[in-house]
Amino acid sequence: MCKIVRLPLIIFLITLATGCTKSTLVALAPDPDGNIGRISVGNEAGSVAIDSAYQATTITGAKEQPTAPEQLSKEALDKMFAQALSIEPERPQHFLLYFEKDTTLTPESLLLLPRIIAAIHERTSEYISVIGHTDTLGTRDYNMSLSLSRALAVKEMLVRQGVASNTIQTTSHGKENPLIATADNVFEPRNRRVEVVVR
Protein backbone atom coordinates (compact mmCIF):
# COMPACT_ATOMS: atom_id res chain seq x y z
CA MET A 1 0.00 0.00 0.00
CA CYS A 2 1.18 3.54 -0.74
CA LYS A 3 1.15 6.21 1.95
CA ILE A 4 1.20 9.86 0.88
CA VAL A 5 1.76 12.80 3.23
CA ARG A 6 2.00 16.49 2.33
CA LEU A 7 4.12 18.45 4.76
CA PRO A 8 2.97 22.06 5.15
CA LEU A 9 4.15 24.64 2.65
CA ILE A 10 7.29 23.39 0.96
CA ILE A 11 8.13 19.73 1.48
CA PHE A 12 6.58 16.77 -0.27
CA LEU A 13 7.15 13.38 1.35
CA ILE A 14 6.09 10.03 -0.05
CA THR A 15 6.80 6.54 1.25
CA LEU A 16 6.55 3.82 -1.35
CA ALA A 17 6.46 0.15 -0.49
CA THR A 18 7.84 -2.10 -3.21
CA GLY A 19 7.97 -5.74 -2.26
CA CYS A 20 9.84 -5.96 1.05
CA THR A 21 11.65 -2.64 0.69
CA LYS A 22 10.46 0.86 1.34
CA SER A 23 11.81 4.09 -0.05
CA THR A 24 10.99 7.63 0.90
CA LEU A 25 10.97 10.48 -1.62
CA VAL A 26 11.41 14.01 -0.25
CA ALA A 27 10.86 16.94 -2.62
CA LEU A 28 11.01 20.71 -2.16
CA ALA A 29 8.35 22.98 -3.69
CA PRO A 30 7.94 26.77 -3.54
CA ASP A 31 5.51 28.14 -0.99
CA PRO A 32 2.49 30.11 -2.29
CA ASP A 33 4.53 33.34 -2.26
CA GLY A 34 7.22 31.77 -4.48
CA ASN A 35 9.84 31.41 -1.73
CA ILE A 36 11.82 28.20 -1.89
CA GLY A 37 13.86 27.75 1.26
CA ARG A 38 16.28 24.90 1.91
CA ILE A 39 16.09 21.49 3.57
CA SER A 40 18.59 18.88 4.63
CA VAL A 41 17.60 15.23 4.40
CA GLY A 42 19.75 12.77 6.31
CA ASN A 43 20.16 9.52 8.18
CA GLU A 44 23.02 7.48 9.72
CA ALA A 45 24.77 7.23 6.35
CA GLY A 46 24.87 10.93 5.52
CA SER A 47 22.79 13.86 4.36
CA VAL A 48 21.85 15.75 1.20
CA ALA A 49 20.86 19.41 0.93
CA ILE A 50 18.02 20.47 -1.36
CA ASP A 51 17.69 24.15 -2.19
CA SER A 52 16.07 24.33 -5.64
CA ALA A 53 12.41 24.16 -6.52
CA TYR A 54 11.17 20.66 -7.38
CA GLN A 55 14.41 18.92 -6.44
CA ALA A 56 13.99 15.54 -4.75
CA THR A 57 16.02 12.89 -2.99
CA THR A 58 15.20 9.28 -2.19
CA ILE A 59 16.06 7.35 0.98
CA THR A 60 16.00 3.57 0.68
CA GLY A 61 17.18 2.63 4.16
CA ALA A 62 18.77 3.86 7.38
CA LYS A 63 22.21 2.69 6.31
CA GLU A 64 22.11 4.09 2.77
CA GLN A 65 22.81 7.74 2.10
CA PRO A 66 20.01 9.72 0.44
CA THR A 67 20.44 9.92 -3.33
CA ALA A 68 21.92 12.97 -5.00
CA PRO A 69 19.24 15.62 -5.64
CA GLU A 70 17.21 14.95 -8.78
CA GLN A 71 15.34 17.69 -10.63
CA LEU A 72 11.66 16.90 -11.14
CA SER A 73 9.02 18.94 -12.93
CA LYS A 74 6.10 20.63 -11.21
CA GLU A 75 3.78 18.47 -13.30
CA ALA A 76 5.47 15.26 -12.11
CA LEU A 77 5.22 16.29 -8.45
CA ASP A 78 1.59 17.38 -8.87
CA LYS A 79 0.80 13.97 -10.34
CA MET A 80 2.66 12.06 -7.60
CA PHE A 81 0.98 14.02 -4.83
CA ALA A 82 -2.43 14.53 -6.46
CA GLN A 83 -4.27 12.71 -3.67
CA ALA A 84 -2.65 14.77 -0.90
CA LEU A 85 -3.04 18.04 -2.82
CA SER A 86 -6.74 17.38 -3.44
CA ILE A 87 -7.49 17.42 0.30
CA GLU A 88 -5.16 20.26 1.23
CA PRO A 89 -7.13 22.98 3.03
CA GLU A 90 -7.30 26.44 1.51
CA ARG A 91 -4.73 28.80 3.00
CA PRO A 92 -6.05 31.57 5.28
CA GLN A 93 -6.28 35.05 3.80
CA HIS A 94 -4.64 37.90 5.75
CA PHE A 95 -5.62 41.56 5.57
CA LEU A 96 -3.92 44.49 7.32
CA LEU A 97 -5.99 47.53 8.24
CA TYR A 98 -4.16 50.67 9.41
CA PHE A 99 -5.34 53.48 11.68
CA GLU A 100 -4.92 57.23 11.44
CA LYS A 101 -5.45 57.53 15.20
CA ASP A 102 -7.31 55.70 17.93
CA THR A 103 -10.00 53.64 16.12
CA THR A 104 -10.19 55.67 12.88
CA LEU A 105 -9.15 53.63 9.86
CA THR A 106 -7.10 55.20 7.08
CA PRO A 107 -9.04 55.80 3.83
CA GLU A 108 -6.99 53.07 2.11
CA SER A 109 -7.91 50.58 4.81
CA LEU A 110 -11.60 51.43 4.54
CA LEU A 111 -11.37 50.43 0.88
CA LEU A 112 -10.18 46.95 1.93
CA LEU A 113 -13.37 46.17 3.86
CA PRO A 114 -15.35 45.01 0.76
CA ARG A 115 -12.51 42.60 -0.10
CA ILE A 116 -12.60 41.15 3.42
CA ILE A 117 -16.38 40.72 3.24
CA ALA A 118 -16.06 39.06 -0.18
CA ALA A 119 -13.41 36.63 1.13
CA ILE A 120 -15.64 35.70 4.08
CA HIS A 121 -18.63 35.03 1.80
CA GLU A 122 -16.60 33.14 -0.84
CA ARG A 123 -15.19 30.79 1.79
CA THR A 124 -18.39 30.65 3.83
CA SER A 125 -15.96 31.27 6.67
CA GLU A 126 -16.98 30.39 10.19
CA TYR A 127 -13.71 31.49 11.76
CA ILE A 128 -12.46 35.05 11.39
CA SER A 129 -9.67 36.30 13.62
CA VAL A 130 -9.37 40.06 14.29
CA ILE A 131 -6.14 41.03 16.08
CA GLY A 132 -5.47 44.56 17.32
CA HIS A 133 -2.03 46.20 17.54
CA THR A 134 -0.50 49.57 18.39
CA ASP A 135 2.81 51.31 17.95
CA THR A 136 5.06 51.76 21.02
CA LEU A 137 3.80 55.22 22.05
CA GLY A 138 2.24 55.14 25.51
CA THR A 139 2.12 52.65 28.36
CA ARG A 140 1.61 48.93 28.05
CA ASP A 141 -1.86 49.09 29.67
CA TYR A 142 -2.99 51.97 27.44
CA ASN A 143 -1.87 50.14 24.31
CA MET A 144 -3.54 46.86 25.35
CA SER A 145 -6.79 48.76 25.76
CA LEU A 146 -6.36 50.66 22.47
CA SER A 147 -5.51 47.54 20.48
CA LEU A 148 -8.60 45.78 21.85
CA SER A 149 -10.72 48.82 20.96
CA ARG A 150 -9.35 48.66 17.40
CA ALA A 151 -10.13 44.96 17.10
CA LEU A 152 -13.67 45.49 18.43
CA ALA A 153 -14.22 48.44 16.05
CA VAL A 154 -13.27 46.27 13.06
CA LYS A 155 -15.46 43.43 14.33
CA GLU A 156 -18.39 45.87 14.56
CA MET A 157 -17.77 47.02 10.96
CA LEU A 158 -17.83 43.40 9.77
CA VAL A 159 -21.00 42.62 11.74
CA ARG A 160 -22.72 45.70 10.22
CA GLN A 161 -21.90 44.18 6.81
CA GLY A 162 -23.71 40.95 7.69
CA VAL A 163 -20.92 38.80 9.17
CA ALA A 164 -22.17 36.68 12.06
CA SER A 165 -20.75 38.02 15.33
CA ASN A 166 -20.11 34.51 16.72
CA THR A 167 -17.72 33.72 13.83
CA ILE A 168 -15.36 36.57 14.77
CA GLN A 169 -12.72 36.12 17.47
CA THR A 170 -11.03 39.30 18.71
CA THR A 171 -7.67 39.50 20.46
CA SER A 172 -5.25 42.32 21.23
CA HIS A 173 -1.48 42.43 21.42
CA GLY A 174 -0.94 46.05 22.36
CA LYS A 175 2.56 47.11 21.43
CA GLU A 176 4.01 43.62 22.00
CA ASN A 177 4.12 42.35 18.39
CA PRO A 178 5.13 45.25 16.14
CA LEU A 179 5.22 44.80 12.38
CA ILE A 180 8.17 47.22 12.34
CA ALA A 181 10.55 46.87 15.29
CA THR A 182 11.16 50.19 17.05
CA ALA A 183 12.38 51.49 20.37
CA ASP A 184 9.80 52.31 23.03
CA ASN A 185 7.68 55.46 22.58
CA VAL A 186 8.15 55.64 18.81
CA PHE A 187 5.37 56.70 16.45
CA GLU A 188 5.18 54.11 13.64
CA PRO A 189 2.03 54.12 11.44
CA ARG A 190 2.58 50.57 10.18
CA ASN A 191 2.32 49.23 13.73
CA ARG A 192 -1.07 50.92 14.30
CA ARG A 193 -3.04 48.10 12.72
CA VAL A 194 -5.58 45.31 12.89
CA GLU A 195 -4.90 42.01 11.18
CA VAL A 196 -7.94 40.15 9.88
CA VAL A 197 -7.44 36.45 9.14
CA VAL A 198 -10.16 34.69 7.16
CA ARG A 199 -10.02 30.90 7.29
Image (cartoon, rainbow, N blue to C red):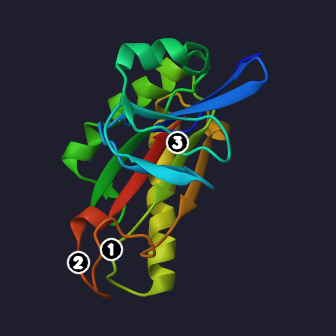
Circle nearer the viewer, 2 or 3: 3
Mark 1 or mark 2, earlier in chain: 1
| Disc 1 packing (10 Å; few <14; some 14–19; many ≥20) | many
Q: Nearer the viewer, residue 129 or 117?
A: 129
Dot placed on the residue nearer the N-terminal end, 2 or 3: 3
Residue 85 on image: x %, y %: 55, 20
- Residue under numbered circle 2: 187
Q: Residues within 10 Å of mark 3 (few under 14, many from 20)?
A: many
Is 109 situated above or below 134?
Answer: above
Q: Which residue is mark 1?
A: 135
Which is nearer the N-term, disc 1 or disc 3? 3
Contact between labelled residues 3 and 2, with CB atoms less than 8 Å apart: no
Tag 1, which secondary structure? loop
Q: Which residue is mark 3?
A: 66
Q: Amino acid at mark 1?
A: Asp
The answer to whether residue 101 of the structure is visible from this angle is no
